[in-house]
Image (cartoon, helix red, strand yellow):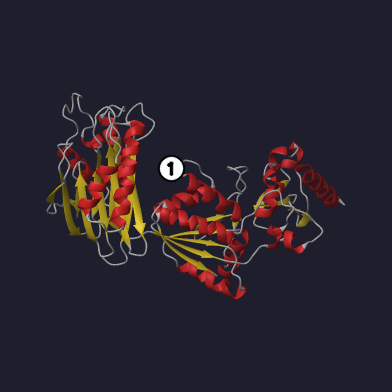
Amino acid sequence: MGSNTFIEVDSYQFSKNGTHVCGDVFLSRKVKDENRVIAILSDGLGSGIKANVLATMTASMALNFTIENQPIQRTAETIFNTLPVCGTRKIAYATFTIIDIDCDGETRIVEYGNPSCMIFRRGELFHPEWKQIAINRKDTRDKSMFITSFISEKEDRIITFSDGISQSGMGTKNMPFGWGINDINKFAKNQIQRNENISASALAKNMVMQAWKNDLMKPKDDTSCGVIYFRNPRRMLLLSGPPYNSENDKKLASIIESFPGYKVVCGGTTSQIISRELNKDIQVGLSPNILGLPPESKMEGVDLLTEGILTIGKVSEILENYNGEDINQDSPAHKIVKMFFESDEIDFLIGTRINNAHQDPSLPVELEIRRSVVKKIIKLLEDKFLKKINLEFI
Amino acid sequence: MEKKIKVKICIGTLCYVMGGSELQLLEEHLPEELKKRVDIEGSICLGFCNSNEDEKPPFASVNGKCVSRASITKLINQIKKELEDGLH
């Protein structure tokens, strides 16, 4: 598969109408040392908090056991023995799908109780061979898991979803037995044909939105979809801070000039250095009070030019509090976050010169040190958003 | 035609947190008769904060002259002064 393939993982979900908490849980983790990506979807029995607890426990156990390379049978048995037994139904039950992809593209999928996932290769459904594995449990009819492994190729997509999707629309005139696997296949194929570059996040959202429409905008069950997409990385460069040695100013300018992808500069002094080195003017806008942030500026060849530490601090805050909602605000910090989300591989080039004027103890607000805020952002992007990050101090 | 008075408002971090964010509203507060005679623009750090120990942010400049601890009133006064000086 090569190192220049990026694995995009994203999901979207709706809770059953009338519940505030979703009983499906989608978790994903990038194991950096092993260059491995693991994604889990679990659907807990019932709905609401009870289902969420079951699904969260199942998903976290499945994730952690998979990271530790535990045999799948032991993983499954441990999960079933640990789950609390439902008071009304007298069984402990949550489904799971485990998708485990290693650095060579070797992909292993284990399914228990969820609708079978769809794999698309070159626009067509791809059917790897599935093996059935029995599990030792007496309390349910669901006594087997299905497992497959194959080598993923670039542009492959794996789509996993909960039964809220396949059963959406059930009981309506158009689809008395629900949406159904065949029509879901057709829908997904059509989505990919219409836009062959459709991102994992957009595809997951479209699937869930269609199920929501099937259910006449009142989902009858928790509805979730997770998508994994192997593709060319989209790159972004974020520059902030003047180089410690001003001899490096030229290097900074030439890096930004030749970079392929989004280019963002945070910081007035940094912008001035680039403006001077590349001989390009800066146009500064005035726009009072966009969420308490100084306005952005413009320079030819740079996608976004913002103030430094306040904006970066806000970016960190947005990433920390982000919970899957759409980003509609238009502040410079929100624009940076949107670019992060649209990129897979993000280079941070951080200047380490300290601005003396920021160190005055009589300032009304605490201005954090750039380096520590950037490190926090990087940790969030890596752990929460699975982005590939390169960090260089200059 | 009369040359316009050029006002630059620093939007650098320091000036912004010290009250410069309010200065962006200057145009709304300008008396009618001044509005057509003034050009207002933002500016990346004007450099006053690190070069002048005695003066305090927020900074702005009116026709290139530094205004420290700038407020909307202070800027309007400075603009009026520039206009008067221009007459002599």
- Image coordinates of residue A341 in percent, x first then y, are 41, 51
**Residue at the bottom extreme?**
A247
Indicate whether A383 appears above or below A46: below
- Image coordinates of residue A125 in percent, x first then y, are 16, 50
State which quadrant residue A213 falls in: top left
Q: Is residue B15 left or right of residue A17?
A: right
Q: Mark 1 packing: few (<14 Cα in 10 Å), some, or many (20+)?
A: few
Instruction: Please report the residue visible at 53 percent of the width from the left and 48 percent of the height from the top.
Output: A317
Q: For mark 1, name the chain.
A: A
Q: Is residue A2 left or right of residue A309?
A: left
How many numbered dots are placed on residues in this image? 1
Type of the residue with mark 1: Asn
Q: Is residue A365 left or right of residue A214?
A: right
- Image coordinates of residue A310 in percent, x first then y, are 60, 51
Indicate whether A219 appears above or below A391: above
Mark 1 lies on residue:
A323
- Image coordinates of residue A3 in percent, x first then y, are 31, 67
Q: As rendered, which of B44 and A51 lies closer to the eye?
A: A51
**Residue at the right extreme?**
B88
Instruction: Please report the residue visible at 27 percent of the width from the left and 27 percent of the height from the top.
Output: A88
Q: Is residue A299 visible?
A: no
Assign the C terminus of chain A to one quadrant of the image: bottom right
The secondary element bearing badge 1 is classed as: loop
Q: Is residue B33 visible?
A: yes
Assign the N terminus of chain A to one quadrant of the image: bottom left
